Image (spheres, rainbow, N blue to C red):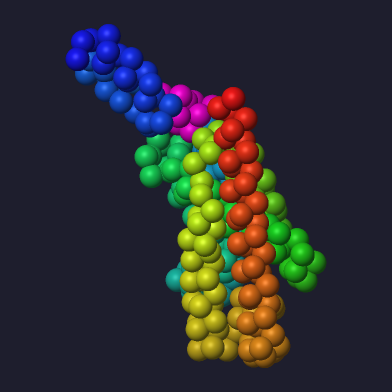
Amino acid sequence: MSFSQNRCALLGDMHYKSASEQNGHEVMTKVDLETHGVPARLFAGLVALAAWIGIGVHFHALADGPASWPGVLWTLLGYFTITTNLLVAVVFTGVAAKARFATPWLLGATLLNILLVGVVYGLLLQGLKELTGGSQVANVLLHRVTPALTTIFWLAFVRKGTLNRHAPLLWALYPLGYLVYALVRGSFEGRYPYPFIDAARIGWAQTLTNSALIALGFVVAGEVLVWLDRRLGRITAA
């Protein structure tokens, strides 16, 4: 194969490959420019910073009292809000650092789960507790800012048209795994992280019903996300 044929083959594959080598130098592809270009990396850094600060402020607010640091950490890890914002922080730190694990599939999963955090808070939890100081700052960052910034990043920078209809079922493994963890942990500790899964207060039947409805909403929202991804992918390719 001639040099010109090699060059044409390389150009034809550039849209689908994250990076390639040409004459010993790394080539920045269109996909890289979308997800790993400078604007995307800067915005990803902003998303990660919001998540890290939110977690840190919340930790400090709880640790500013009689509780020990390990005890505070254990308490925080009982909340889906914290574990999901930790996912956001790690994934978007990876994007900012040009890590190749930050694929459209993983970014879609991260988006859907952090949106679940925001929606459940807005519909079921908002106003149940009066928050002040650091707790209020953390609440805004973790429930409002990170879902909004993650959505903007996905719309603006993530390559579209790669998701399939089975993705939401796989994405649901994480919240379902958290649910099992929260219920088992709650049964031992005698307290549950959220009122809608507080089996000691509302009973197991209502807890499982609430969980099933949230899971159904999650999968439906995931299918909508896949549909939007495909539609935007066709528009981009046109």
56 or 30: which is nearer to us? 30
Q: Which residues are magenta?
A: 28-39
Q: With respect to residue 176, does 109 lie above or below?
A: above
Please name the residue shown 40% across and 35% down the image: 98
Does residue 222 appear anywhere in the picture?
yes
| Image x and y of residue 82, in percent | 56, 62
Q: Is 6 displayed left or right of 47 in the figure? A: left
| Image x and y of residue 148, in percent | 67, 45
Q: Is 169 displayed left or right of 224 in the figure? A: left
Q: With respect to residue 79, does 23 lie above or below?
A: above
Please name the residue shown 59% across and 25% down the image: 238
| Image x and y of residue 162, in percent | 49, 41
Q: With respect to residue 148, does 118 lie above or below?
A: below
117 or 13: which is nearer to us? 13
Please name the residue shown 30% across and 25% down the image: 20
| Image x and y of residue 125, in percent | 74, 68
